[in-house]
Amino acid sequence: RRPHTETTMTKTAPTEQQPKQYCILFYKYHPLTSDPAILETYRRATEKLCASLHLTGRILLGLSEDGEGINGTLAGGKLDVEAYVDCMLGREGVGSDEKDDGDVDSDGENFERRNGAIKEFRTESKRFFEKLNVPELIFPSSGDFKWSSCQMNGDENNFESSSDDNSGNNSSWFPDLNIKMVKEIISSGGAFSNITMKDTSKGYLTPKEWHEEIKALVCKRQQNAKRSGDTDPKEGSVVTAGKDDENKDTRQKEEEEVETILIDVRNHKECQIGSFAPGIAIDPNTKTFSQFPKWVQDHTAPADNDVHGDNCDKFNGDGLDGGLANNKKTGIGKALDDATVMLNNKRILLYCTGGIRCEKASAYVRQMVPNHKGVFHLQGGIHKYLEEFGNKGSVADENLGENVTIDEVGETTGTKDLNAFPKELNECQFLGKNFVFDRRGALGADNGLAQSNDCHAMRESEGENATSDPGRTIVGKCLYCGGPWDVFLPESVCTVCREPILICPRCKLDLYQKQQHLRGITTATNESSEGKSVVGIRSEYHCEDHFHLKECYYTNLCGFSKEDMDSQMKKLRDHSKPLEGIGKKGKQRRRTIRKQIDKIESFLKGDNSDDKSIGPPHGNSRANVDAATQCRHCGSSECASDCWGFHGGNLRMKRKPKQGTDESFSNVDEESTIHRKKRNRTPSNQRVGKMLKREMDLKEIASLGLCKPPTEYRLEDSGMRVPPPVVRVLRSAVKGRWCGKTLGWVMSNEFFEGDPSRDGSSTITTSSSISNENALVDRLVEAGLLRINGTPVSKLMQVTPTISPVGPFKPSHILLKNMDIIERVCHWHEPPVIVPPTISITKHSVPGFEDITNDAEGNSPKIFCIDKPPTVPVHPAGPFYANSLLMMVEAQEGLPPKSLIPCHRIDRATSGVLICTNMPSVASAVQRKISGGGKVKKLYLARVKGKFPASLNRDVVLPEQVINIASTRWCGDDNDILEVNAPLAVKMENETNSINSAMSASPMHRIVSSDGKPSVSRFRFIAYDEQTNQSLVSCCPITGRGHQLRVHLQIIGFPIQNDVEYGGTIHRDSIKSQMELSVKSMLEVSASTLRCLHDDSITEEEIRMSVENCKCCVHGKEGVKASFNSSQLLGGSHAIDLHALKYCISFGNDSKADDLNENNTMKFTTSIPSWAARFVDIASVERFHWLA
């Protein structure tokens, strides 16, 4: 007797009728835990329950305390599935010893098995949720489970189950059982991470209410079309709502005032084969659900936004089946070209397969579209709707099956659009098939027509349309001929991205014959004239997004001649050229084309020994044909390409033990073993590009003398450290947002060359070369100080046109392309920092790494706890290089430059604990602990304005603009810890309206925003000074967002002292004098430097020209103020009263760091800053207790 999770590749006899299979879809948002070690207990209990009930499928458990829950799809015999439902409804066992669908319980064995499994799970579940101190996960009613069933005929897609009990589970829609823990139970890429259960529990429409809504939409659409004369509908095709609708007049009046739009939240492939009201429902044309938030953002923007850009080109023409196909004349929606095609001021209806996606999507739309007129979604999704209305079916006529696009909803094709609806409005309003993620592929509106039967029928057909059943509505279209077709087959996937496509048997055969002819292989055929698969090559298909590559992108290159492959490379390069000017947006597409070109070049050279899927370069050899017949995924020549995804499971999963089992799948056919090139990714610090840059950096540091201890260049009277100027070559690769911009624009807006207004304190007005943003760039080019890709721009001017659209062509008019490298020779001045003569450092050995040596000198790996002073950046960034903390510490401790690796972030203006190490593996281990949650404790001290509340007796008032986004609560044993929960987003400095933006220490200002990342902080009152009206507060960042503590203290009304960027106060007179002192010190050091250090590659002429074109040297005080902002010149936000007091890291079991011993804890502390010691007389930092 094999384990229940084991599956075999044995096929069932096609003539034997198999018992019915039953499938349930279910989900529930419920608080669990964010700790994987704790949730593993519940996962194992769930896996054991499903295993005992002989169920297969997928269940996802969300790692979240508020916002996720459980999401699953299970299949099996009826009584086994019902037993699982009973268990999740909170029942302690099955009701009776029933018999159904071949489930023989004559000896009561299965009845006892089910009861025992339920009771054991219920016991474990109660114990688990009692420890979490949250309600148990119990579904409110059986209506929360979406049921479907199908008679699984024995075809080649079915696999025999290893379970030999009588549960009726002789064939399964899933290859195995997989229960796993995930961050999101419906993947969105983190876009919905700030949505909680409170946000999702609203906006429901029952199937009956939804049915009435769709009826009203269809009715209004047809009435408006008839009234406008767009169509001459057939008799009975234009209908009205029932006369017994009591609120008909009121509803029609409201709908005329407020436009209602219908959005299909599912992916494009799902929308292709079935939809509510085709021609009205909007298809966002997404491949994954994680793309939906971006679509919402694009369609919530102001009307003057560019909706025809790179992100929206796929919504034009036939790329949007049924989407935004709402002509102005119909009144339901507007064409995409109309600026009003946005979500603003609309009543929005959303639907999906089972309800889980549209529940989160509706909550997201409410947040992103504050001026909506109501957001509602179909409760239970299409599945629940079909349970109630699916059996009624829909009447088909000759025009059904047209899934209308934008271009088709017009004056010329209105008839097809109007007839793509049921003739009677009380019929099922869902047309086509409902895509499901199991072996059935899709379900018809009658809830029993599975795609798997269609697959079998198609393969047995003789080239005819297997879905020509007059009782069914075909919404989908063949991608190649446009004919009606709605069957997704496992072998019909895009060869570029593996996206399933719709292709009819006739086009499939034609395409095979064409590709066979191109390859010159005539010794065998892949498909006979009847459409059946036999020995031969496998066809390759291309989806809508990659259809333009159908003549030049082939995964299998065997059979092509050298001329053919040369032609393919030429076409690929032609497709790649337009992508070079769109920056990061085209990065993945460029990479795809580049890899294919490299593959062809390698193939032509004969260097294909590692690729088992391709044969010799060309020819009709037997080896060629054999290679071309292999399945791309598993490498077997006999595989029907249904070995991947939910069709057949992953062979990698079949070869390794599943979680909770003791045996692996040992009976997998040896021929199906995967022959794929193993990918060994080189660590980032060992890649060629990284190593080359490191060598260049080390050479520059040595030649310019940048790595010096803090005492070097330090002024004793002020404590300021002012390095002398040097001559450097600055290099920068063109970023995505720079592509297509002029050189002058980039130098002015990104590097602030020639822009005296970047700092509010600048008053330069005497030099026209500085006031004009392009004048200085042209001068730098003339002086030979600017290069592009290593070539001086002055030489590039010799091959560029002399006239531009705006007049004579100048160097500043040169357009930048992707992958360009901009170089500038500059006279480098660094702003000052304030440092002590010696920076305090403590060294620690790392548990588990004591016997490991780091380098040839035998240095053991160490952790360095640095007491970072304020004003000093951690690593070289912006205008700081020699004045960076790591450079000074390495020189002070006698370490080689760039040998210390910081393990976490700390702002330049913040002081306190900074943990570094001298070994990458140690840094990775510590970073995993810090980012993993629960492994690190942090405690900060802050001096804030006002009297901070000591307990819940005092209310905390949030600003009106964030009151619906942020929240606060009191926690702790004594309710003396204030927790602030406010999502944070980044806003660039030039987008802020703050009067203190000129003093900003960072160009990326943080704000509280509904689309920001989740951020939670805790605070506790320590002491209060009545004279200064200031409080000392201990702080703990639960999450690790930038500027998190600073923003959270600001929104609750207690900004940090000296933090002018986030509402803090500062003494203007002292800051002004400090800034003047900084400028004076820089100019004095510069004047006393007789000979600037420089790299050997820089000529004397370049040195002279760089000094002559240096703003600091030419314009003195005003030039310095124009080159650096106030914060960099110690004029505000350079040092705030926020100090990282202590860290505690627990080195326990970690699957990615097995070398670390269990239960080892390391504590890192620093001294209390002087501004905190004034409040209380504290001898030890242990008096400050942890807040988490």
Image (spheres, helix red, strand yellow):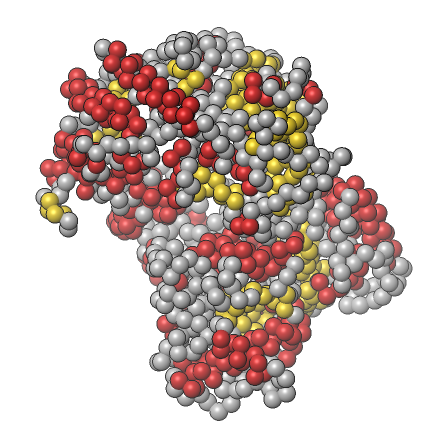
Q: Position of residue 584 (x, y in %)?
A: 37, 44
Q: Quadrant of residue 409?
A: bottom left
- Image quadrant containing the C terminus: top right
Q: Quadrant of residue 208?
A: bottom right
User: Compared with residue 44, is residue 284 higher up or lower down, i.e. above or below?
Assistant: below
**Left or right: 735 with respect to 30?**
left
User: Compared with residue 190, is residue 1081 higher up or lower down, i.e. above or below?
Assistant: above
**Left or right: 1127 with respect to 798?**
right
Front residue of this view, candidates 220 and 1122? 1122
Q: Position of residue 680 (x, y in %)?
A: 48, 33
Q: Position of residue 764 (x, y in %)?
A: 24, 32
Residue at x 39% of width, y 15% of height:
721
Residue placed furthest toward the right: 107
**Left or right: 427 with respect to 1069?**
right
Residue at x 21% of width, y 36% of height:
771
The answer to whether residue 1103 shows anywhere in this view is: yes
User: Compared with residue 730, is residue 269 higher up or lower down, i.e. above or below?
Assistant: below
Front residue of this view, candidates 489 and 1164? 1164
Residue at x 57% of width, y 44% of height:
982
Front residue of this view, candidates 613 and 192? 192
Q: Position of residue 962 (x, y in %)?
A: 55, 48
The answer to whether residue 670 shows anywhere in this view is: no
Residue placed furthest toward the front: 1027
Front residue of this view, candidates 683 and 724? 724
Total marks in image: 0
